[in-house]
Image (cartoon, rainbow, N blue to C red):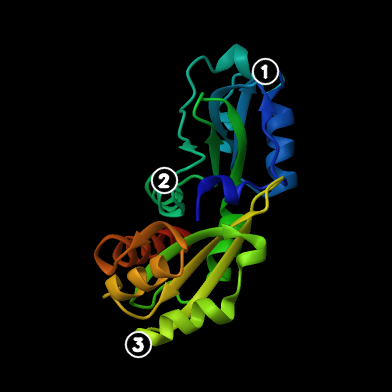
Amino acid sequence: MKAKQLISEYIPPIKYTETGEKALQWMNEFRVSHLAVLHGREYVGIISDDDIYDMVDPKHQLKEEFINLPKPFVYENQHVYDIMKLIADLKITVIPILDAHHKYLGCTDLLYLMSQIVGVGSIRENGSIIVLSMGERDYSLTQIARICEENNAKILSSYVNFHKNSTQIEVTLKINTDDIEKVIRTFERYDYNITETYSKGNYTKDMSDRYDELMNYLNM
């Protein structure tokens, strides 16, 4: 799951020319402790409720008191565990998402991210990840499951991402085996386009570690 798939339309950025009072009002309204700050489309950084409380006068514009804000972010093509790591490491509730040109696309917040993670079944189960790309008309979960089962593997969970203004879809499979070579070869024999694979060593442990870090943060 990529960062661009996790953009929430619920949490807006705040303009650099807005006041501290306005920022705090939005934080209370949207139930977050941080907001992304923009100057035009330029990402300036994030501001926290603690920053607002420390202002000389919260009626001042943000740009008057905050010249250098912290600038955590992820690029749109980064994986979900990069977001989880930032949240756990920096103890922030909002993660700005930028494109390759460093332009602000949106953000994901802690609650929305958690809802998406909970929706991905079997996140803590051992196994591997295979990401397939195909046309909508070519999608058949029955055939995909049959290919896995022919190679003594079972699908633990699946996630389908429909690309806007495109007939291409991306299917992410979590399967119950670490040995995926035979499964991959069979998918290739059936002309499936495999865009990403993650074995236990480089995916499941990372996801489990990031999940643990996130849970520890939430339980603080």
Q: Amino acid at mark 2?
A: Leu
Q: Give the side of residue 23 with respect to residue 200, left or right.
A: right
Which structural element holds mark 1? loop
Residue under pointer 3: 152
Quarter of the image where one finds residue 27: top right
* Mark 2 or mark 1, whichever is nearer to me: 1
| Sequence-earlier tag: 2 or 3 | 2
Crowding at dot 2, Cα within 10 Å, few <14 / some 14-19 / many 20+, comes out as many
Locate the C terminus by quadrant. Answer: bottom left
Residue at the spot of label 2: 86
Amino acid type indicated by mark 3: Asn
From the image, state whether disc 2 or disc 3 is nearer to you: 3
**Amino acid on which the number 1 mark rests in the picture:** Gly
Label 3: few (<14), some (14–19) or many (≥20) C-alpha neighbours in 10 Å: few
Instruction: Tell me where residue 81 sits by quadrant.
Output: bottom left
Q: CA distance from mark 3 to mark 1?
A: 54 Å
